[in-house]
Image (cartoon, grey):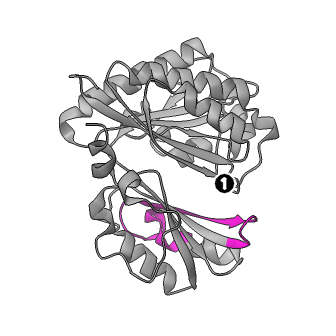
């Protein structure tokens, strides 16, 4: 693709049902290569896994964000996943430390362009956060778009780029650079959402769970199930097999689900009797996906 560092990005947009909108946004991310697309109508969310060299990826992300802003109106949004933006989070992903600097630079470029060109407030989070209160996505998204607008109006939250108030229909965007994160869902064989929430509360890091584990409990109307939805920042500290067994100790499991890409090592010793919905190792394991670009 280029002699410049190859970077990944996993933009999340707040639309999980409208196929025409999801497809149009996906096309708008060109020339970045689309490695994987995951959509979920219950979450009201689509996750695009993209790859492009440094210097191309930022422009591709701005183009996709422009399409999301044009086509998604948060005032009509339906879905259970926390969000504050039409293009909600835009992480730049570096697979190894040698390209961390390139990913950070590209993330800052994308953030500045999105804020300037699309008049969308952009908050830097994670390792790029400029205030401690913005390190966690959950801290920024707490209460949703309406609460974000109130906090910005009071001056409690100030974006790093773009206007000091949310976009009327597209809200705000959150941008960072980070190593691979595993978005992993466990569907319970029950519709008891309170059970899913109690399991999530126990297994997230802030509730005494393993380091780097984030978790929420959701209801999935289309499947008639409850779900424990994880973000795993370090699978060596919070192995997927361990999380699955911890969930199974409190509730029967229907199936698991990987959202986007993950390192192959994350699935070592994964329980054979837990099916992974629509899992495609050739497409969804990072090593295989990157090999397809050669």
Q: Which residue is mark 1?
A: 43
- The quadrant of the image that shows the N terminus is top left
Q: Position of residue 70 (x, y in %)?
A: 70, 23
Residue 153 visible to an observer of this rendering: yes
Residue 97 against residue 27 in the figure, above or below:
below
Residue 158 visible to an observer of this rendering: no
Magenta segment: 200-225
* Frontmost residue, 106 versus 121: 106
Residue 153 against residue 93 in the figure, above or below:
above
Most extreme residue toward the left, as rendered?
A: 98
Most extreme residue toward the top, as rendered?
A: 117
* Frontmost residue, 155 versus 144: 144
Q: Position of residue 169 (x, y in %)?
A: 75, 28
Residue 202 against residue 178 in the figure, above or below:
below
Judged left or right of residue 104, residue 47 is right
Q: Is residue 16 magenta?
A: no
Residue at (47% x, 66% y) in the render: 204
Q: Is residue 223 magenta?
A: yes
How many numbered tags mark residues here?
A: 1
Residue at (31% x, 30% y) in the render: 103
Q: Position of residue 36 (x, y in %)?
A: 47, 45
Q: Position of residue 39 (x, y in %)?
A: 61, 50
Q: Secondary structure at mark 1?
A: loop
Query: Mark 1, residues whose alpha carbon is within 10 Å: few (<14), some, or many (≥20)?
Result: many
Residue at (34% x, 55% y) in the render: 285
Quarter occupied by residue 86: top right
Residue at (68% x, 42% y) in the render: 15
* Frontmost residue, 207 versus 72: 72
- The quadrant of the image that shows the C terminus is top left
Judged left or right of residue 216, residue 148 is right
Judged left or right of residue 279, residue 188 is right
Quarter occupied by residue 152: top right
């Amino acid at each position: 693709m280029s002699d410049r560092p190859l970077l990944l990005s996993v933009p999340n947009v707040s639309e999980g049902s409208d196929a025409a909108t999801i497809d149009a946004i996906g096309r708008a991310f060109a020339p970045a290569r689309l490695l994987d697309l995951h959509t979920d109508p219950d979450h009201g969310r689509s996750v695009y896994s993209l790859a492009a060299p440094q210097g191309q990826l930022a422009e591709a992300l701005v183009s996709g964000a422009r399409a999301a802003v044009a086509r998604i109106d948060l005032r009509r949004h339906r879905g259970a996943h926390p969000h504050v933006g039409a293009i909600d989070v835009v992480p730049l992903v570096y697979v190894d430390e040698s390209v961390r600097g390139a990913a950070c630079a590209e993330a800052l470029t994308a953030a500045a362009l999105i804020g300037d060109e699309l008049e969308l407030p952009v908050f830097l989070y994670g390792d790029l956060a400029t205030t401690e209160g913005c390190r966690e996505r959950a801290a920024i998204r707490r209460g949703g778009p309406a609460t974000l607008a109130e906090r910005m109006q009071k001056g409690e939250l100030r974006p790093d780029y773009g206007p000091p108030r949310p976009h009327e229909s597209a809200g705000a965007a959150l941008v960072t650079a980070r190593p691979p994160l595993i978005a992993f869902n466990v569907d319970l064989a029950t519709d008891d959402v309170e059970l899913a929430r109690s399991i999530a509360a126990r297994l997230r890091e802030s509730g005494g769970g393993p380091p780097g584990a984030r978790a929420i409990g959701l209801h999935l109307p289309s499947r008639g199930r409850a779900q424990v939805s994880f973000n795993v920042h370090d699978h060596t500290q919070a192995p997927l097999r361990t999380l699955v067994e911890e969930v199974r100790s409190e509730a029967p499991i229907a199936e698991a689900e990987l959202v986007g890409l993950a390192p192959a090592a994350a699935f070592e010793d994964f329980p054979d009797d837990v099916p992974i919905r629509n899992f495609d190792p050739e497409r969804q394991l990072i090593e295989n996906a990157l090999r397809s670009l050669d």
